[in-house]
Image (tube, grey):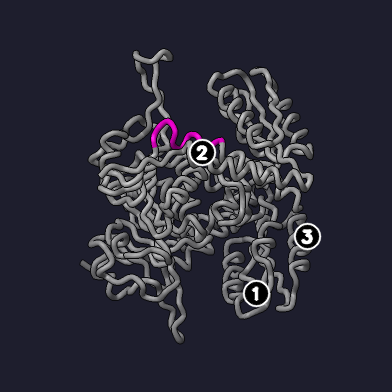
Amino acid sequence: MAAKVISGKEVAAEIRKELTVQVAELKEKGIVPGLGVVLVGEDPASVSYVTSKAKGCQEIGMFEETVKLAKDTAEEDVLKVIDRMNHDPKISGILVQLPLPAHISVEKVIGFISPEKDVDGFHPVNLGKLLRGEECPLPCTPHGVKQLLVRSGNDPAGKHVVICGRSNIVGKPLAAILMQKAAGANAVVTVVHTGAKDIKHYTLQADILVAAMGIPHAITADMVKEGTVVVDVGVNRVPDDTKKSGFRLAGDVDYEPIAEKASFITPVPGGVGPMTVTMLLYNTVEAAIRLNQA
Amino acid sequence: MTAQIINGEQVARDLRKQLKEEVAFLKQEKGIVPGLAIVVVRSPFARMHVARLKERTCRQLGIKCEIIYLSETTTDEEIIYRIERLNDDRNIHGINIHPLTPHLSHTLISQQVDPEKDVEALHFLNMGDFLIGRPRMVPFVASGIMKLIEATGINLEGKRAVVVGRSQLVGKPLAFLLLERNATVSICHSVTADLDSYTKKADLLVVAAGHPRTITSRMVKEGAVVIDVGVNQIGSHLIGDVDYEDVKNIASWITPVPGGVGPVTIAMLLDNLIKAARNS
């Protein structure tokens, strides 16, 4: 059996198309969703993320403002920018690009964003709402995983979802999302991690397997049951002399042999990756709607 | 094999002894007397006897306890007004709201409690901080269950833990506490088909489903540790979610109902209170 490929590019394009329509409708009512991005320093990966976020905003007709700060900017000055955006009616969502330089407290900066404008979904108030099952912006990557599953016809309800990895940005929030009594959730969730003696024992029991460990090709074909839905969240740089950059991107899943066994699989790149920025745009549009209801 | 009994009363006694020492220390070193406020709306839901038990426990430990009784016809506004006054009261370090009648907005009300005084850990801010592993307050029923597990001496590292039930107070927070102890955690619930296939693999099985005697011996792995969080009133009897007489023949450890989880929860609520007083 050869797996159907769940194309993150296609699903992301589909969602962006929906957002474009939604933004146009909002504009008719005089509401322009706007994303404020704060970038501290010039880390090349961060610059490229920020650029793709800005481009995404423009494509769907949203307002966007990127504030670039020098890497030695004082924490206080970063907070000032956020404070200004918290009060700026043009801005409905604020994103601070991580990682931040070591002298700036991520916790403090994230906690300083108004929860209504926290479109990354990492403000503790929003994480609390998530755990409780209240409406809130869902963290972008796990939200993207949920959308990939639902939109490929793999509703997690009643399924056994095995999540490998328990990070604060993917594993834990994804577990919290999928265990809720809610549409597109209602799964039996198992979280395995480096503390497990035999990861394979668990992955073989999965109906839906989500790999989010950050270890290239950690999931091998012998760890996957025939017919499993496999979602690969890993984006690892592995050295590759044949590439100009000297590396290539590899997922946490050993793609080729697993694609022979799985029923559905997400590729790397082109799987979960494109969803993350898209869900950020989605959260920003939602935030704009909520702010205008209040 | 007959299971050893996890004696919740004994674990609670040991916890209270520690708490009493901490209270004495706080008084001596900082001049702080921890103060708990319990808001009780008189109704059949209110669990008045539990409020009085909390009051008595506080007195034994040297904690100040104030019960605020409101009539069954009270409103959201009145409760919120009371909470705001308690938030401002320097002698109160923790606020505990007893189950409310359905006409009141529990979620809205629980968000009015100052997060520093939120000993139930229900404020979104506290739940979020808890989720990412830096809790100010830990949901106290879940932390009480962890104390019972500790009392068995089993090491959770690499073990499979299965939690049945995904309530706000038990299932959901417990899953994340078990994860922190390096267990592999599965959370099952009402929509789970084939519950046995999960429970039977559990080294640690925690049941908080709210249905009497849901779990029978054929659903339990030989030698498992079984924690029963259920309290179902059948006539004049309290019955757990686990068929105790049946499952005790196969488990290695088991909690009785009553006398298992119940007694430790008050101690863990007061543990949060003492933490809050210390940080005040």
Foreground tag (3 vs 2): 2
Measure the C-alpha gap from mark 3 to mark 1. Answer: 22 Å
What's the amino acid at mark 2?
Met
Mark 3 Cα shell of 10 Å, populated few (<14), some (14-19), many (≥20): few
Disc 2 is placed on an element classified as: helix
Q: Are marks 2 and 1 on the same chain?
A: no
In percent of width and height, residue B124 lies at 62, 52
Nearer the observer, A52 or B50: A52
Is B29 left or right of B203, judged from the image as shown?
A: right
Q: From this view, report whether residue A73 is shown above or below residue A270.
A: above
Q: Is residue B278 visible?
A: yes
State the mark number for residue B101.
1
Nearer the observer, A170 or B169: A170
What residue is rendered at 75% in x and 63% in y? Answer: B80
User: Circle 3 sits on which residue?
Assistant: B85
Nearer the observer, A235 or B144: A235
Where, quadrant-wise, is the N terminus of chain A in this rendering? top left
Query: Chain ID for label 3?
Result: B
Q: From this view, report whether residue B200 is shown above or below residue B274.
A: below
Q: Say whether residue A271 is magenta.
A: yes
What residue is rendered at 35% in x and 45% in y? Answer: A264
State the mark number for residue A109.
none
Disc 3 is placed on an element classified as: helix
Q: How many marks?
A: 3
In percent of width and height, residue B94 lies at 65, 57
Q: Say whether residue A88 is magenta.
A: no
User: Circle 2 sits on which residue?
Assistant: A275
